[in-house]
Image (cartoon, grey):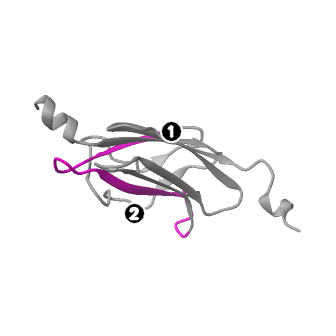
């Protein structure tokens, strides 16, 4: 690969730190990035054990294009409830964006997004220390 084509590609590596006491299983709808492709041998793991981390990477599939995607995980044994959704956008033009969301109030996700052509985004899933319902009046 020459220097010019390398600079025209985009890639985003995602790290999901599972700081819960739950095993996470990959949502089957998270099979491909919506724009781009998975980097060889760096697809999202099918499960992430409690206290462990998962790592994956997407890259642009054509020169001059970016990569966009999302990956969702569920609690092992509970196929009906998504726990965390991670999403990223590394466009050819513009700024990188990252979003994380949780579906259950006992969890929270922190997002630390990187910038640049070949970026790293870190998502930290953890138990919320106090139930959010305690703050409602």
66 inside magenta stretch: yes
1, 64: nearer the viewer: 64
Read off the residue under disc 1: 53
64 inside magenta stretch: yes
Residue at the outermost top position: 3
Q: State the quadrant of the N terminus.
A: top left
Secondary structure of residue under mark 1: strand
User: Image quadrant of residue 14?
Assistant: top left
User: Image quadrant of residue 41?
Assistant: top left
88, 65: nearer the viewer: 65
* Looking at the image, residue 132 lies above or below residue 19: below
Residue at the outermost left position: 2
Residue at the outermost front position: 94
What residue range appears in magenta?
53-80
Read off the residue under disc 2: 28
Q: Position of residue 17 (x, y in %)?
A: 54, 40
Give me the residue at 16% from left, 47% from top. Answer: 63
Q: Position of residue 60 (x, y in %)?
A: 24, 48
Give me the residue at 44% from left, 61% from top. Answer: 27
| Mark sitting on residue 94 | none
């Amino acid at each position: 690969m020459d220097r010019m084509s390398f600079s025209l590609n985009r890639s985003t590596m995602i790290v999901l730190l599972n700081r819960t006491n739950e095993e996470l299983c990959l949502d089957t709808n998270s099979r491909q990035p919506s724009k781009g492709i998975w980097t060889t041998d760096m697809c999202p793991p099918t499960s992430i054990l409690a206290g462990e981390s998962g790592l994956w990477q997407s890259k642009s599939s054509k020169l001059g294009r970016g990569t966009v995607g999302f990956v969702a995980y569920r609690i092992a044994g509970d196929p009906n409830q998504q726990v965390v959704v991670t999403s990223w956008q590394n466009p050819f033009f513009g700024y990188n964006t990252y979003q994380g969301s949780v579906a259950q109030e006992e969890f929270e996700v922190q997002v630390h997004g990187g910038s640049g052509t070949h970026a790293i985004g870190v998502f930290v899933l953890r138990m919320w220390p106090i139930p959010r319902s305690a703050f409602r009046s």
